[in-house]
Image (spheres, helix red, strand yellow):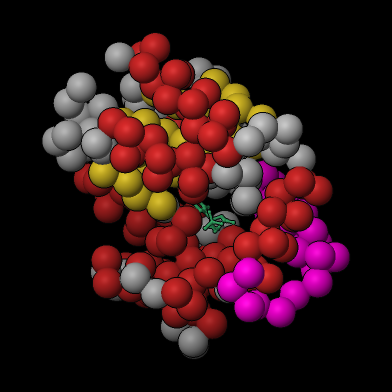
């Protein structure tokens, strides 16, 4: 299976990052977490840069940074992600990654709809806001980041509203995406379901 692009979209903390990594490992594909691109731009904007200039100047080293995982950077990412010039500046990097030999898995919000509309397999990974907030709260607490569950739920809901409500590339399932709702699923079952969908498209 050469040059296969797998597009995995969905809201924050639905499990798409874990599923994408596992799927990439299973098939031997490269993996790009496109949220990191927006987070890296968001972090630079918090540091005083202009969003468009930060997006144009982005380089892969900027993605290797643990500080990109904080709630403040996540909110900044979803704000800069609503700016069309930012999305445009990040488009080419994502398409080049998707087209690499040997297969690629990209996860984000608009991979199946905008970045890779011709992807061989498309998944939309979702879960209820409460389940996603509980998972994100556990993750952040484990990393020693101090937040309350109520704050995390409010952040998840604010980010959903912004990501689904923006005019440019809003979060939505592609017409030909297969939906996996992980609310009641173990992560192992969700990974197995994703692998099965991709196998069926080979
Ligand atoms: O997936 P993650 O939570 O890291 O994404 C951070 C933010 O980046 C999202 O809330 C969303 O606004 C934005 N994003 C996007 N398009 C993508 C990936 C992420 O707009 N393909």
Q: Position of residue 132 (x, y in %)?
A: 71, 49
Residue at the image point whose x is 65% and y is 77% from the top: 145
Query: Does any portion of residue 114 appear in the rendered image?
Result: no
Residue 26 image offset from top left, x and y in percent: 32, 33
Residue 17 x/y as whole percent:
49, 48
Residue pictured at 52% horizontal, 23% vertical? 193
Q: Residue furthest right?
A: 150
Q: In the image, residue 181 lies at what x, y percent?
A: 66, 30
- Residue 153 in which image quadrant: bottom right
Examine the rendered structure and indicate whether residue 87 appears above or below residue 137: above
* Magenta-drawn stretch contains 170: no
| Camera-nearest residue between 166 and 176 | 176
Q: Quadrant of residue 106?
A: top left
Residue at image coords 67%, 58%: 136
Q: With 120 as the anchor, is 49 left or right in this view?
A: right
Image quadrant in which the N terminus is located: top left
As for residue 144 lying within the magenta part, the answer is yes
Q: Magenta part of the protein: which range?
A: 142-166
> In front: 168, or 27?
27
Task: Identify which residue, 38 or 101, lies in the foreground.
Answer: 101
Q: Is residue 53 above or below residue 115?
A: below
Q: Is residue 93 visible to us here?
A: yes
Counting the numbered discs, the total is 0
Quarter the C terminus occupies: top left
Q: Residue at x 63, y 69 (%)?
A: 142
- Answer with the quarter of the image where residue 114 lies: top left
Q: Residue furthest left?
A: 101
Going by the image, does 3 lie left or right of 77? left
């Amino acid at each position: 299976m050469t040059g296969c692009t797998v597009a995995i979209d969905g809201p924050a903390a639905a499990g798409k990052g874990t599923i994408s990594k596992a799927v990439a490992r299973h098939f031997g594909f490269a993996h790009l977490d496109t949220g990191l691109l927006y987070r890296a731009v968001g972090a630079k904007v918090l540091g005083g840069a202009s969003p468009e200039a930060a997006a144009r100047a982005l380089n892969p080293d900027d993605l290797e940074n643990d500080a990109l995982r904080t709630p403040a950077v996540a909110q900044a990412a979803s704000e800069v992600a609503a700016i069309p010039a930012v999305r445009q500046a990040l488009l080419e990097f994502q398409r080049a990654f998707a087209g690499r030999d040997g297969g690629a898995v990209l996860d984000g919000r608009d991979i199946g709809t905008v970045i890779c509309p011709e992807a061989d397999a498309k998944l939309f990974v979702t879960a209820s806001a409460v389940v996603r907030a509980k998972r994100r709260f556990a993750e952040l607490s484990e990393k020693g980041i101090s937040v309350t569950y109520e704050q995390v739920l409010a952040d998840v809901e604010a980010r959903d509203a912004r990501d689904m409500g923006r005019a440019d590339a809003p979060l939505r399932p592609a017409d030909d995406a297969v939906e996996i709702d992980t609310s009641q699923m173990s992560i192992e079952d969700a990974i197995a379901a994703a692998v099965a969908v991709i196998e069926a498209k080979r």
